């Protein structure tokens, strides 16, 4: 199965009077953050290669018939769906034009356990860093939060900031 199920689920019997079909029903509240970006992508297979195979996202569930995947990576969650022609009310979900690079004006900050290893893996697979690895300290009231971070663009040009936490220190 190309999209393994790893989210909390309940086994539910449909049509129990006839001993009918059993299905797994995902418990959304048990695994979804309250804000989950959904990115329109030009090629789902290319995006899965990037997010799943290179970065290390886990596909929690997918709807292959809609060219859609819901993924997790160390607490971050992301949905991707391949572009497709839409009509009527469905067309309202897409704000065009869908030109490269997508997502202008925003970046997604994603925690990762080892920024150096991830940066090396991305570069080895043909994804150059837009901003090299560096350590930064950001003020939060009376403490500084440290992170080692870098920027990279996904195959559609979305800007991703991967961050490894370095801890805190006083100002």
Image (cartoon, helix red, strand yellow):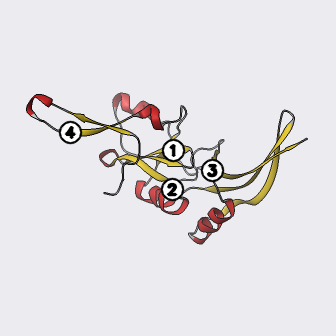
Tag 3 or tag 4, which sits nearer the N-term? 4
Q: Is residue 97 left or right of residue 129?
A: left
Tag 2 or tag 3, which sits nearer the N-term? 2
* Residue identified by numbered label 3: 159
Which element is circle 3 on? strand
Q: State the mark number for residue 51.
A: 2
Mark 2 and mark 3 in contact (Cβ < 8 Å)?
Answer: no
Seen at 56% across and 51% down, the residue is 100
Q: From what the image shows, is residue 159 above or below residue 21?
A: below
Seen at 50% across and 39% down, the residue is 96
Seen at 36% across and 53% down, the residue is 3
Seen at 51% across and 54% down, the residue is 57
Tell me residue 51's x, y (percent): 51, 56
Tag 2 or tag 4, which sits nearer the N-term? 4
* Residue identified by numbered label 1: 78
* Residue identified by numbered label 4: 22
Tell me residue 67's x, y (percent): 36, 48
Q: Is residue 146 left or right of residue 99?
A: right
- Alpha carbon distance from label 4 to label 3: 41 Å
Which element is circle 1 on? strand
Tell me residue 152's x, y (percent): 64, 57
Q: Nearer the viewer, mark 4 or mark 3?
A: 4
Seen as rendered, the residue at the extreme right is 171
Q: Is residue 66 left or right of residue 43?
A: left
Q: Residues within 10 Å of mark 4 (few under 14, many from 20)?
A: few
Which element is circle 4 on? strand
Q: Quadrant of the C terminus?
A: top right
Q: From what the image shows, is residue 1 above or below residue 33?
A: below
């Amino acid at each position: 199965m190309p999209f393994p199920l790893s989210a909390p689920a309940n086994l539910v019997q449909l049509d129990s009077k006839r001993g009918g079909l059993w299905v797994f029903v995902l418990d959304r509240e048990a695994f979804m953050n309250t804000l989950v970006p959904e990115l329109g992508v030009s090629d789902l297979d290319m995006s899965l290669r990037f997010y799943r195979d290179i970065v290390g996202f886990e596909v929690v569930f997918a709807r292959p018939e809609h060219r859609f995947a819901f993924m997790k990576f160390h607490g971050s969650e992301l949905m991707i769906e391949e572009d497709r022609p839409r009509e009527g009310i469905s067309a309202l979900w897409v704000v065009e034009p869908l030109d490269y690079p997508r997502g202008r004006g925003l970046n997604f900050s994603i925690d990762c356990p080892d920024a150096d290893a991830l940066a090396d893996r991305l570069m080895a697979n043909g994804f150059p860093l837009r901003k090299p690895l560096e350590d930064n300290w950001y003020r939060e009231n009376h403490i500084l939060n440290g992170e080692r971070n870098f920027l990279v663009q996904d195959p559609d040009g979305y800007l991703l900031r991967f961050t490894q936490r370095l801890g805190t220190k006083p100002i």
